[in-house]
Image: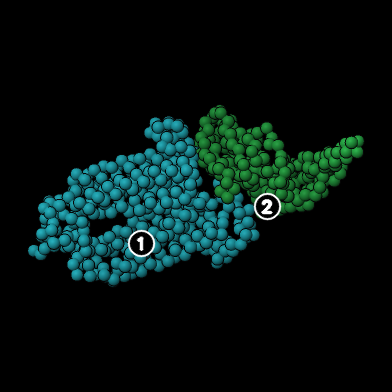
Chain colours: A cyan, B green
């Protein structure tokens, strides 16, 4: 048995994987995705300011606000706050559970990081309302995605299969040509999500109302006179803020990003087909292709439906899932680079240290 | 001494002549052709406004008799910033009734009070969203049914300052803030009157939220009256 396997065995013996903890971590991740969906509905319906105060709700304690008053835009915003409180509570439990039961010190700290991030998210959401700042909304939406990735990470690293390093090490050479491609694709998806968040939180509705053309052209005009025509001809009960040239360019960048990402995800799938990899990689790459195609279709549908709230929200959730799959593939393709490189003599009994790269 | 008094009186009269000869600029706004169809407003099943006021539609083009176009904001565009005007004591009343803001289009002077009332049996939030460039402050306040009127004033001119309700996302009112009193909103038949404009030549601008902007020159003569009409094309 080599040094790495000795450490693996000792790690597993003194810190066996907990199915209950793993299930709870997955539950927290799924709850976070549900929270992102509800947050998406809030923005899609344009009701983020329907509850003017925070942390109270129309002067009530948030948890005592009468159900009879959960009407109109208040329903979405108030539900979002309640579910956010629930996710915060789950994160507290997760953090405490890691602290008490996990022997991997770095994971205890990751649990604390999750708690800090969820608190920051809650405060950002509240400040967005009390300070009346759209910019905070953009940051709140972006941080939500990062927090979701963190919950998925915590769920993955508490699985039994993650702990079996020898299995991951075996196919490491097969992922050598893929790791950077997967990482770049995932980063592109994250940038695309940020573009999307910027578009949504400016509350100007659709900057470009048609597809595949854009205002009837391949690239729309953005001079002042043409923009005025766009804005005057826009008849919508939601009466959005006027569209600006910058918003048109942002929209077109998001469209270009969609094509680019679709190409990259297909490239990942094709490369994986030719490689000898565990089944999980092939399944994930197929899911990734399906998700990206669905995302593309949802993006088109968002435009053609004049940004119908339910379709736009599904597009947000699809984006989160696409990012999640990419992140998972990055994590798994680099799994063999983690763990135990620290010499045994420096390692304290029962307390495996933070992951470090393998020696050259 | 007598000459001085005479000269003084003559100067006073000369200054007063324009005021004495202040007049009204009247006119009519019309729409060429047919207005685009208004959109249905979809109200969620959980919203009492849906049950109270079904079949709601947008109101971008309100066209009356003889193609008269309502809700056009007409005002003197010439710079009046060097002059002092008394701020009207009477506030503008914006009422939330029928799950809509009434009036939809209005005007106030800088410093004039705007009172927002909730006459509906449902709660609203009153959320004015000024253009950040004007420096007018954004606020967002809850207003329960029959609660005390909310008060707002704005120190800086702004065209179509938007008031909205986020609980009911179709509710809007647009209040233009002027630094002078020479403005009007066309009524349901498209008629308007800008009152007490001193004699002189002016640029009158008519601004419809969807129809666009038009300007015309007008001369308020010694008789104290002028007429200017506008015709908008639907977009």
| Left/right of residue B15 with respect to residue A270 in the rendered view | right
Q: Is residue B116 above or below residue A5?
A: above
Rendering quarter of residue A168: bottom left
Disc 1 crowd, CA 10 A, few/some/many (<14, 14-19, 20+): many
Residue A166 seen from this side? yes
Which residue is the extreme one toward the front? B1
Question: Mark 2 falls on what kind of element?
Answer: strand
Q: Pointer 2 indicates a residue of which chain? A: B
Say which quarter of the image contains residue A66. Answer: top left
The residue at 19%/70% (across/down) is A360
Above or below for B130 versus A171 = above
**On the image, numbered disc 2 is attached to which residue?**
B212
Marked residue chain, label 1 = A
- On-image quarter of the N terminus of chain B: top right
Asked whether the beta carbons under mark 2 and mark 1 sit within 8 Å of each other, the answer is no
Q: Which residue is mark 1?
A: A186
Q: CA distance from mark 2 to mark 1?
A: 45 Å
**Residue B41 at x, y percent in the picture:** 56, 43
Taking the image as shown, residue B191 lies to the left or right of residue A42, namely right
């Amino acid at each position: 048995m080599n040094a790495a396997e000795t450490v693996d065995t000792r790690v597993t013996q003194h810190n066996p994987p907990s199915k209950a903890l793993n299930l709870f971590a997955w539950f927290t991740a799924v709850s976070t995705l549900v929270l992102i969906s509800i947050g998406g509905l809030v923005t899609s319906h344009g009701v983020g300011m329907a509850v003017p105060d925070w942390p109270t709700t129309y002067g009530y304690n948030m948890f005592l606000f009468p159900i009879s008053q959960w009407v109109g835009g208040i329903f979405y915003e108030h539900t979002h706050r309640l579910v956010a409180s629930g996710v915060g509570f789950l994160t507290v439990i997760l953090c405490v559970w890691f602290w008490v039961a996990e022997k991997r010190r770095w994971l205890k700290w990751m649990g604390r990081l999750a708690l800090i991030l969820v608190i920051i998210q809650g405060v950002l959401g509240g400040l967005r309302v009390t300070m009346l700042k759209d910019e905070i909304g953009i940051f709140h939406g972006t941080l939500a995605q990062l927090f979701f990735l963190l919950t998925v990470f915590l769920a993955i690293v508490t699985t039994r299969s993650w702990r079996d390093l020898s299995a991951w090490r075996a196919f490491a050479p097969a992922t050598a040509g893929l790791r950077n491609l997967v990482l770049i694709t995932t980063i592109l998806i994250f940038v695309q999500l940020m573009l999307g968040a910027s578009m949504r939180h400016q509350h100007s509705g659709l900057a470009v109302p048609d597809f595949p053309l854009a205002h009837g052209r391949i690239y729309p005009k953005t001079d002042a006179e043409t923009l005025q025509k766009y804005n005057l001809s826009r008849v919508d009960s939601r009466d959005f803020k006027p569209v600006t040239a910058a918003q048109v360019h942002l929209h077109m960048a998001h469209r270009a990003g969609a094509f680019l990402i679709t190409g990259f995800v297909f490239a990942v799938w094709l490369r994986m087909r030719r490689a000898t990899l565990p089944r999980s990689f092939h399944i994930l790459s197929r899911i990734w292709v399906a998700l990206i195609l669905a995302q593309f279709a949802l993006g088109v549908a968002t435009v053609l439906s004049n940004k119908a709230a339910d379709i736009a929200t599904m597009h947000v959730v699809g984006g989160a899932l696409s990012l999640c799959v990419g992140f998972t593939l990055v994590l798994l393709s680099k799994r063999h680079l983690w763990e135990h490189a620290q010499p045994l003599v420096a390692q304290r009994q029962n307390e495996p240290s933070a992951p470090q790269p393998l020696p050259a | 001494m007598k000459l001085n008094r005479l000269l003084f009186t003559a100067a006073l009269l000369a200054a007063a002549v324009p005021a004495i000869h202040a007049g009204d600029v009247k006119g009519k706004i019309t729409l060429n052709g047919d207005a685009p169809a208004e959109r249905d407003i979809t109200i969620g099943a959980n919203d009492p406004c849906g049950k109270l006021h079904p079949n709601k539609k947008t109101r971008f083009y309100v066209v009356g008799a003889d193609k008269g176009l309502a809700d056009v904001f007409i005002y003197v565009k010439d710079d009046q910033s060097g002059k002092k005007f008394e701020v009207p004591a009477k506030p503008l009343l914006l009422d939330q009734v029928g799950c809509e803001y009434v009036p939809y289009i209005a005007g106030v002077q800088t410093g004039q009070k705007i009172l927002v009332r909730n006459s509906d049996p449902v709660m609203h939030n009153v959320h004015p969203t000024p253009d950040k460039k004007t420096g007018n402050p954004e606020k967002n306040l809850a207003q329960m049914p029959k609660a005390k009127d909310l008060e707002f004033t704005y120190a800086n001119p702004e065209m179509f300052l938007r008031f909205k309700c986020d609980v009911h996302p179709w509710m809007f009112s647009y209040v233009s803030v002027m630094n002078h009193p020479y403005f009007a909103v066309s009524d349901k038949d498209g008629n308007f009157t800008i009152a007490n404009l001193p004699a002189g030549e002016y640029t009158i601008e008519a601004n419809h939220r969807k129809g666009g902007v038009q300007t015309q020159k007008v001369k308020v003569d010694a008789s104290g009256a002028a007429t200017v009409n506008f015709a908008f094309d639907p977009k």
